[in-house]
Amino acid sequence: MSNPEDALPKVVLRDADAVLPDRVLRADIVMQGSVISALTAPGTASGDEVWDLGGRRVSPGYIDAHIHGAQGVDFSSADAETIARSADELAQQGITTIYPTIVPGSEKHMLAALKECARATQLSSSVLGIHLEGPFVSGGRRGALPEAGIHGWDEKLLDRLLEAANSHLRIMTFAPEEVPIESQKRFSAVGILGSIGHTCADGAQTRASIDAGVRRCTHLCNAMPSIHHREPGPVMALLLDERVRCEVILDGHHLDDEMVRMALKMKGTSGLMAVSDAMPLTGLGVSSGVFCGQEVCSDGSRATLSDGTLAGSVTLLPEALNRSGERMGLGFPELSNLGAATAAEDLGLPRRGLIRSDYRADLIIEGESGIDAVLRGGVSVKDPEGPRLPSEMERIQ
């Protein structure tokens, strides 16, 4: 059977520094339709369009599986059109895939939010699914989550949440001690990735959950018992088990850099996924507002409740990854794995998160001054109807 992409124009990104999982390779990147069709030696590829990148760095688009909003938009309360518009604006910054993350509340609130996020998947190609952070979590480790959003385990409520999400609920943060093991085994059967978080579980409960099939963790170390030398708790169980991938928030506030270094030594970039946990005050500088039904203030670097509890992050993924690269000496391949490849693998996204033949052309093109262009499915995010790349990049064919 022929590939329909083969009939579409062939576009060459000539002389690019392509960020691969293990190295940066100078190459021509050949795109056909929405996918990458080949990588060839620099200057050797031909096509219907040839753009000279002049050695600009090209990385896979970022995938953020835990993001509550930005620029005043709250994914838990916005309508589908607003969520889609926000997703497209985030794509211009290199975040080409998001899973809008809903905070728990009343059943009515959650059902409405799930329906709007599900509709947003039809309006923006960046929205691939939904992350519901709760509601079956521990009141003892709720962090900034609203107390009214904590629900006891209720299988019928889960069914209603799934119905409202219309098959788009992909991730659900839960506390192992709050959900029966047999019910945890059901998650994968209904298409959900159970994610351990907001939990008071001990190490044994965490290991039992992993043995039941749970394979991910929500914001490692945050909203869970810390490591103690006699009671290592859930964090050590999550770090030691190579079957589990863990979200890490790299804003410099949720995790100390030394903790990130230890996690990297134990799990490598293939076991860690950078997420922003960004909330609506992100991008607004010094500001205040309501999030999770509570007053929140941001100094432009961190967002907190009145008692000092962290209330999500105000740092988007590109900035957080750049910060980690500078502070911890991480190279572009490592940062790309943290920001794209591991999440794609975790979420079961086919042909995303890597620069590789037959993979989707979600690409960030960066020059000396930052991002010059972002392609989503081979098309400019900034101007889908206009030129594929900006005028400062020479089209030589």
Image: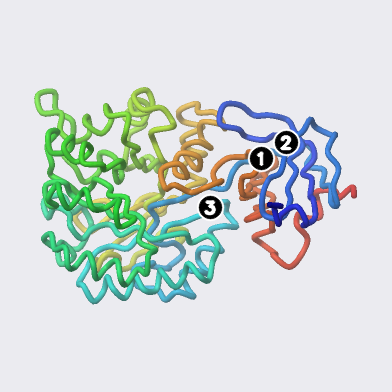
Marked residue nearer the N-terminal end (2 or 1) = 2
Q: Residue at x 42, y 68 (%)?
A: 73
* Amino acid carrying mark 3 in the image: Ile
Tell which tag, 2 or 3, sits nearer the viewer: 2
> Nearer the N terminus, badge 1 or badge 3?
3
What residue is shown at x 49% (from left), y 40% (from top)?
A: 321
**Rendering colour mode:** rainbow
Task: Say the numbered circle drawn on residue 95.
Answer: 3
Query: Helix or strand or loop: what does disc 1 sit on?
Result: loop
Q: Does 294 sit above or below residue 243?
A: below
Contact between marks 2 and 1 (CB within 8 A): the answer is: yes
Dot 1 amino acid type = Ser
Residue 57, x across and y down, in percent:
68, 38
| Rendered image: mark on residue 102 | none
User: What residue is pinned by disc 2?
Assistant: 39
Q: Which residue shows up at 50% across the image and 36% down it?
A: 337
Q: Compare residues 109 and 172 and report the one nearer the observer.
A: 172
Q: Position of residue 298 (x, y in %)?
A: 35, 57
**Mark 3 nearby-residue class (10 Å; few <14, some 14–19, many ≥20):** many
In percent of width and height, residue 374 lies at 65, 53
**Mark 3, secondary structure of its residue:** strand
Disc ID at residue 357: 1
Residue occupying image coordinates x 61% and y 41%: 59
Type of the residue with mark 2: Leu
CA–CA distance in space, label 2 to label 3: 23 Å
Q: Earlier in the sequence, mark 2 or mark 3?
A: 2
- Pointer 2: residues within 10 angstroms few (<14), some, or many (20+)? many
Spatial CA span between label 1 and label 3: 21 Å
Q: Position of residue 297 (x, y in %)?
A: 31, 60
Query: What is the distance, in whole Å, between disc 2 and disc 1 at their CAs?
Result: 7 Å
Residue 10 in the figure: left or right of residue 72: right
Identify the element where label 2 is drawn: strand
